[in-house]
Image (cartoon, rainbow, N blue to C red):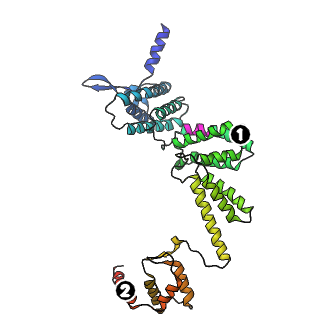
Amino acid sequence: MEKVKSANKQSRAVKSFYMQPKLTLNLTKTVKLNVQQVLHNWYNLLKDDNSPEDSSPLFTALSQENLSKSLESDLELVPSRLMDELVNEKDILDKGQYLRLVQALLVNISDFLFTKPGEFPESCFEIENVLEFIQDFFYQFFDFEYRATKYCVQNMKDLLLLKFDYWKIKLHQSPLLEAIQDCVSSKMLLPERYLTCRKVNYLKNLFQLIEPATNIITEEYIRQLCICYNFNDACFINYETTLIKKKLSENNDPITVLKEEQLHMAQLKIKTGISFEVNNPSVKSQLHDWISAEIKKMETAILKKEDKDLVIDPEAKIQTSLSVAKLAVIIRLLVVDRIIINKSIAPMLRTVAKLFTTLQKDEISFGSLETKYHAPDKATLSIVKEMLQKWVTIIGKL
């Protein structure tokens, strides 16, 4: 008999938001709430840090232990309730929006509980189970770009710390592992660079691929995995460029080395649809662009050293809608009016030909520009005159 009384007492101590009492016309009716409403009630109760008595008559005189058990009990019901609601309920018109709201509420409740581990010892773990259930059964609606819970991030941080320490011993303080650890740590420590659910899954999969090779693990093996699975964070790109720079310092023909690296990059196999940073270009693309920029920089330096005409990037040129004849006349006017005061005309015109483009040509012939500069035709003079008159009107509007 005492056991039955104890069980009844414990049953009364655990409450649920799913069956909410509501007073109508002096009668108390029980209202059934959906998962989103239940989680919203829990979120408000926990967020405002109110006592149960102030928040809901349902939790009047409920101890902290029983409040925690009540939350865990409601969380355990979420998977079955969600299944029932999404299959049978006709009121939920947008299932994706509904599930994303449930996900956001779960994450925010978990983050609050994480700051009070002694008060809700099992609730964060239960929330992780619910989130995994939503990922497994409602994958198409789950928001993988939403932040992971603090509880999940802390567990991953503790796990990775052990793994990295072990791997560093095996690889004798590998620069690659340090780069990956810096990347993950920065995402965990800085609020604006939080780990998303997708990034957590990505890292779990990547480290699971490293695990089987623990006995024969090498830095090159991890590097190839990072390339293949498109670990396109800046930390890994910096590691790769550092390796290339080391090769350049050991070779007398750096441009050839870079072109060989570029060819090698083009042959890399990268799994499609996978990346760590969805907004960054792929590892392959970033390294290709970096190598191309280095080659251009070195070739330009060689031209300068050999005193050859400087090759100007087409995007750096002054692009105009003029013809060569009009450009020549305008330059002639600037010289006559002593706005351009170069002592020698030919070198100045050569520079103009290199720096400017016309409507028809990206490369201006120095000979053509020089001819039209010294012998402008009457038609062009008339057109430029009209252009100058138009400028007078424009000046008045500035």
Image vertical order of residue 141 relative to residue 286, above or below: above
Q: Residue at x 57, y 45 (%)?
A: 188
Image vertical order of residue 33 relative to residue 6, above or below: below
Q: Residue at x 47, y 10 (%)?
A: 4
Q: List the residue tagged with mark 1.
A: 166
Image vertical order of residue 256 relative to residue 172, above or below: below
The x and y percentages for residue 148 are: 52, 40
Secondary structure under badge 2?
helix
The x and y percentages for residue 161 are: 66, 40
Camera-nearest residue between 78 and 41: 78
The x and y percentages for residue 198 are: 52, 42
Tell me where residue 211 sits by quadrant. top right
Residues in magenta?
A: 152-157
Image vertical order of residue 88 relative to residue 110, above or below: above
Q: Residue at x 68, y 42 (%)?
A: 164
The x and y percentages for residue 298 are: 65, 68
Tell me if residue 248 can be seen.
yes
Q: Give neighbour class at mark 2: few <14, some 14-19, many 20+ (Cα, 10 Å).
A: few
Q: Which mark is residue 383?
A: 2
Specify the amino acid type for callout 1: Tyr
Image mark count? 2
